Image: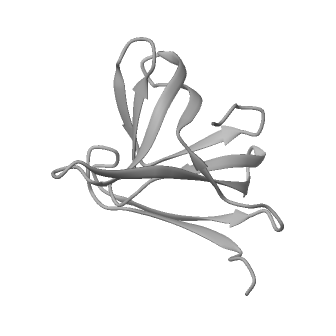
Amino acid sequence: MSEPLFVEVYVEPCAAATDGREQRFRRVPGTAEREVRRVRYEAEDGTEGMWAVVAVDDEATGAVRPARAYTVEDSSEGTVWLVVGGLHGLRLEHEDTGVTASEPYLLLGRAVPLE
């Protein structure tokens, strides 16, 4: 069975995307998806550093699982990491300060460390 050509992102209305989000990204052929637990990221408020990241399936119940990363093509940035979560996006927690952020997904440069 061949790998899908696209990664579909579907996020219901939630803290990460008040109106929800539905997008698809072209996957780079021959690249594997991977589990992600930590990312280097800069939040909208300027907080940067390493963040713990999880996929949120349900904000109300707190249902989470590991986030997934794919290598995809972005029209403006070229080849990037796409980090995806669950039906309620991603929850990030800054490792030094405990600050939290919600995002529907992350597009990160290929040089950005993912763990």
Work out whether 72 lies above or below 8. Answer: above
Point out the residue furthest to the top here. Answer: 97
x and y percentages locating residue 9 in the rendered image: 49, 63
Residue at figure coordinates x 40%, y 52% from the top left: 65
One can see residue 74 in this view? no
The N terminus: image quadrant: bottom right
Left or right: 96, with 60 as reference point:
right
Residue at figure coordinates x 67%, y 59% from the top left: 33
x and y percentages locating residue 57 in the rendered image: 32, 57
x and y percentages locating residue 102 in the rendered image: 36, 38
Here the colouring is: one colour
Residue at figure coordinates x 22%, y 49% from the top left: 59
Residue at figure coordinates x 83%, y 66% from the top left: 30
Work out whether 57 lies above or below 16. Answer: below
From the viewer's side, name the closer residue of 72 and 93: 93
Left or right: 45, with 3 as reference point:
left
From the viewer's side, name the closer residue of 10 and 31: 31
